[in-house]
Image (spheres, rainbow, N blue to C red):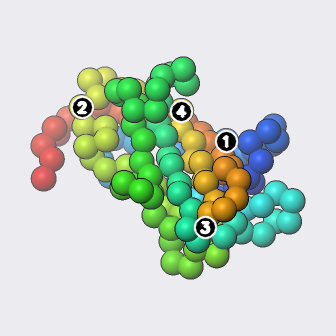
Amino acid sequence: MTVAPVHSDIYDPGLPHIDLGLKMRGDTVSFKVAAIWKETGLPMDLTGSTIWATFKVDLADGDIIAPSFQLSTASAGVAIVDDPTDGILEVTCAPENTHDLEDTTAFFWDVQVKLFGGPTKTVARGQVVFEADVTRAMA
């Protein structure tokens, strides 16, 4: 799995947009993000941070109004990978996050980090499309 380096400044029009492509509804989907300080090029220290990954059909929707969903380090779906000082995190959409979608659905997503004792930064953003699948069973 490739880790996409992502600069941390949301106000920078150069903040990379990561298109996760087409995924199947009800599948487990995981991706990694490297949180990098734009000013120094160094990784963010994620020790003690809270991280959210939010998926929305419409940017005006609330964070958890269906079909939107939010994952986090506080609940489930976002994990810091290995050494938190490396700035690598993994987002995992579980099957139940997309299982109930009625049709193929496009989402906007972003990852926001609240650093321990520091600022809140959006470190990644993009789009993903969950395509309607044939098999509806979940183990």
Crowding around mark 2 (Cα neighbors within 10 Å: few <14, some 14 to 19, many 20+) is some
Q: Left or right: 15 with respect to 80?
A: right
Regarding mark 4 in the picture, which secondary structure is present there? Answer: strand
Give the Cα separation between the discs numbered 3 and 1: 21 Å
Mark 2 vs mark 1: which is more N-terminal?
1
Instruction: Tell me the residue that label 2 is attached to.
Output: 100
Q: To which residue does mark 3 refer?
A: 46
- Tell me how far mark 3 sits from mark 2, CA to CA: 33 Å
What is the secondary structure assignment of the residue under circle 3? Answer: loop
Residue at which label 4 appears: 108
**Quick one: 86 or 127, which is closer to the camera?**
86
* Separation (CA) of disc 2 from disc 1: 27 Å
Residue type highlighted by circle 1: His
Residue 29: give x, y in percent of width and height.
39, 51
- Is 35 placed left or right of 38 in the picture? left
Q: How far apart are marks 4 and 2 (CA)?
A: 18 Å
**Count of labels in the image:** 4
Q: Is mark 1 on a helix, strand or loop?
A: strand
Whether residue 88 is visible here, answered yes or no, is no
Residue extending farthest right: 39
Q: Do the residues labelled 2 and 1 touch (CB within 8 Å)?
A: no
Cβ–Cβ below 8 Å for labels 4 and 2? no
The tag on residue 96 is none
Which is more foreground, mark 3 or mark 2? 3
Q: Which residue is drawn at 62% across and 42% down?
A: 125
Q: How far across and how far down the image is residue 81, in percent? A: 51, 71
Q: Mark 1 points at which residue?
A: 17
Q: Is 45 placed left or right of 51 in the picture? A: right
Q: Residue at x 49, y 61 (%)?
A: 90
Q: To which quarter of the image does residue 134 belong?
A: top left
Q: How crowded is mark 1: few (under 14 residues within 10 Å), some or many (20 or more)?
A: some
